Amino acid sequence: MFTLLFQVAFGWSATLAGAMVVALFAGNVAIKPFTTPIIKRWNFKPVLVFSNAAGALVLASFLFVRVDTPLVLIALLLFVSVGQGWSEAFKDPANFDGASFEIARAALINGVLLFWVGDIARGGRTLKGLLVPALPVCVVAVDLYLAHAHFHRGRQSPEEYYADRGGVVPQLRELQGREGPVRLAQLREGRLSEEVIFPRNAGYIYPGLEVPEGYVTFTPKRLGEFLGMRNEGAKLAIINARVVANASGGRVAMGINTNALPRAQVYHEGEGFGSWKELLAAIEGGQLDYRRKLGWIRGEADEAGGILSGGPEGPAPVVVEREAPERMRLRTRMAAPGAIFVSQTYYPGWRANDASGQSLRVVPAFGAFTAILVPSAGEAEIEFEYRPREFVWGLLLSAVGLAGAGGLWWVVRRREPKTA
């Protein structure tokens, strides 16, 4: 959009228009070190609303940008259009804990890129020849190097950085062998946090180590709001946080959360709510007995109302066999029709089939998690797998693209003149 504005409306060259848009990406880089602290401090929804509103105002300001507007001002507006929330990160000094290197790196990279944009705008007074395209390539290479400089320079080895100093993983695996899949929750002063004893992405190093924050910062909206509620007991129970590591007063204490729900549990009773806000408020306020009743939202899982009509006390346990991160097998005995709650983030694409191959309805449970509706009593063996239709369509489109490219190559080869 901006490149079209600069080229069509302002008459700039493609080189200058593209170089100016680098300021937008520089703003994106600058905000990265602060996104996680900002969302943790103010929660997902307020940050999203504020950033969208501020972004709309910044974009509206381009209505007043003219061809004779100083390039520095245009670059600044582009920078702020992505990074308008960066100043919020300075409000809490705790946000800088362990982030000073990332801040310095972002400042260095942004400074070099802005110099590059400015030099191109001035007609290339400093950078000439191959330096113009080579500089951003070198900047990217240096940025990737500095991102893991503590490994490259030998100040810390990856084995030390990801080390299981407390011997937590063997104990966790032993517990999983007895009870099935369980999660480790890392707390600070009793509140759900992260990187208390393991850094992010440690699950790649230790198979079976499951933590609520997952591998990346992307979090579905409802899950983010669920994890942001104040009722820590209900939160840790529903996310299957069986093991907890709590940092308090400079010390880390390990413990077992006896209140945690199993990874999968049978429910014969449920309670419907008019909206996600009502359901979340009932969980946070303790009005919903989540151990006995499955919470669902009317309009999303109306079938649950007819199936969750009551049943025996103390339903049979569910055996969970985790075959892969995207696939598990569930086995239990249903004394009556009901639902199997799975402490797994609800997302379109999860599918369930019983032993006969019949498809079972998968619906949101407690708003952000997953439940499988089982309409009949008896032995239940269910294959539960993440298999989105978009993946199949992607494979088909890729196959069509490859076939088209192969056909085009064949046609071109056929038309080439043959030499004697």
Image: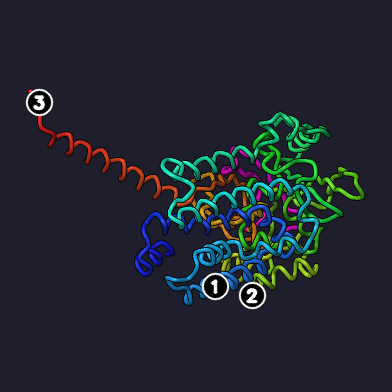
First along the sequence among labels 1 and 2:
1
Q: How far apart are marks 1 and 3 (CA)?
A: 62 Å
* Whole-percent x, y for residue 362 in the image: 56, 57
Determine if the magenta segment contains residue 313: yes
* Whole-percent x, y for residue 104 in the image: 69, 48
First along the sequence among labels 1 and 3:
1
Q: How far apart are marks 3 and 2 (CA)?
A: 76 Å
Amino acid found under the numbered disc labelled 1: Ala
Can residue 297 be seen here? yes
Report the side of 80 relative to 403 (left or right). right
User: In the image, what residue occupies the spot 79% across and 46% down?
Assistant: 242
Q: Is residue 260 above or below residue 167?
A: below
Q: Residues within 10 Å of mark 1 (few under 14, many from 20)?
A: few
Where disc 2 sits, the SS reads loop
Amino acid found under the numbered disc labelled 3: Thr
Q: Which mark is residue 291?
A: none
Report the side of 354 relative to 219 (left or right). left
* Whole-percent x, y for residue 298 in the image: 60, 71
Write down the region rendered in magenta. 312-337
Outermost residue to the front: 125
- The residue that label 2 is drawn on is 274
- On-image quarter of the C terminus: top left
Viewer-nearest of labels 1 and 2?
Answer: 1
Q: Residue 419 carries which label?
A: 3
Amino acid found under the numbered disc labelled 2: Gly
Q: Is residue 74 above or below residue 315?
A: below
Q: Which sits in the foreground, 351 or 22?
A: 22
